[in-house]
Image (cartoon, rainbow, N blue to C red):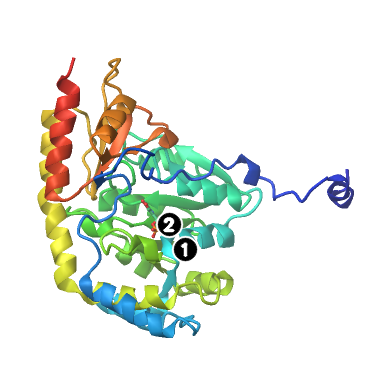
Amino acid sequence: MPHNLLTMTQKRPQPNPGISEISPYIPAETEKKGIKTIYRLSANETPLGPSPASQDAYKKAVHSLAHYPDGNATLLREAIAHHHGLDPRRLICGAGSDELLTLIARAYLTYGTEALHSEYGFLLYPIITKAAGAQPVMAPEKNMTTDVNALLNRVTGQTRVIFLAHPNNPTGTYLPTGQLCYLHKKLPPHILLVLDAAYGEYVRKEDYTTGIDLIDRAENVVMTRTFSKLHGLASLRLGWLYGPPSIIETLNRIRGPFNVSSPALAAGVAAITDHAHINRCLSHNDLWLPWLTEQIGALTLKSPPSTANFLLLDFDNIPGKYAADAHAYLEEKGINLRRLDAYALPNALRMTVGTEDANIFTINMLREFLRQK
Ligand SMILES: Cc1ncc(COP(=O)(O)O)c(C=O)c1O
């Protein structure tokens, strides 16, 4: 049937192909009726909150609410550039890194094209790929870590984008620099490699790179970052992308002209210049991530080696001791972890590094859960 006739016979407006196939993103659960969450460890948020300076900047921004924000995010781009030693002209800010990833999909994917992601890659990638009319293609992982050869084997003439969470959520694993460079080297220059380094600040590995050096010498790599995790500004929706000038120019053409609000811009500048708070948050993670890793190992739960601010807990296949049982048990105690059914990991949970009290209490409750008959 010709397209115009088809649309005339439809009873109601129809979304573009692919959109009805999307399973909507399932956010971390909030409080259930009748159960009080004392420790929310389900959304990879910082346990230390935002910097006091960024809270003050946010409050001061109340005086400019009648005005449109700076659509170029000039001060924030300069502050980010200064902090990371980057060229501010190669930065673009967005309402969360979500928005920037979505803009990438919109600009570089279309009907008949494909985007690659790895097996347990961040849930958003297939969603934004389908929303752009393209086909998500998944490459299996090895030991819950991206497998470069599996990704490369799935590159076809239709591939346009590779989304790589680096380190990945929910596994916390990363690709050593050598493997990342190999992946990039093997890609034809028209395929865009998107390095999503939402948790990049937390990684303490000599052989890890957020990809800045790659981006400086290639035209087909970008990196996205967020203020939602380390900087504790998740509710403000603020992220940024570093990339080659041609990609920045493309994304600037299609983004909303005022995509980041003034309070978010002001809080972002204050957050990235508050080095004392940044260091406090990093030191906290440096202390508690290894502690939790060790404790979880002692409980004999399997967990891939995480480099981020969370851990994946893989439960044994024992009736009564499944992840769902642990989740319910912890919830009763006021601890909220993230279920991972949507990642096809129904017998695993993800735990964010929390405050000292939260971490100790959660480990104690997990031990109690595993020991009870
Ligand atoms: C890997 C990864 N990328 C991107 C995001 C989105 O972050 P934002 O809050 O900046 O949209 C998240 C959030 O959980 C994430 O885990």
The kind of residue tagged 2 is Val
Considering only vertical position in the picture, is 152 above or below 94?
A: above
Tell me where residue 16 appears, x and y as whole percent: 69, 50
Give the residue displayed 24% in from the left and 45% down from the top. Answer: 38
**188 and 256: which is toward the camera:** 256
Helix, strand or loop under label 1: helix
Residue beneath label 1, please? Answer: 100
Give the residue displayed 34% in from the left and 27% down from the top. Answer: 324
Residue 323 visible from this viewpoint:
yes
The disc placed on residue 158 is none
Helix, strand or loop under label 2: strand
**Res. 76 image quadrant:** bottom left
Ligand 1 within 8 Å, label 2 CB: no
Considering only vertical position in the picture, is 268 above or below 148?
A: below
Residue 159 visible from this viewpoint:
no
- Is disc 1 surrounded by few (<14), some (14 to 19) or many (20+) residues within 10 Å? many
Tell me where residue 265 appears, x and y as whole percent: 38, 76
Give the residue displayed 33% in from the left and 75% down from the top. Answer: 58
The disc placed on residue 194 is 2
Splitting the image into four quadrants, where does ligand 1 fall?
bottom left
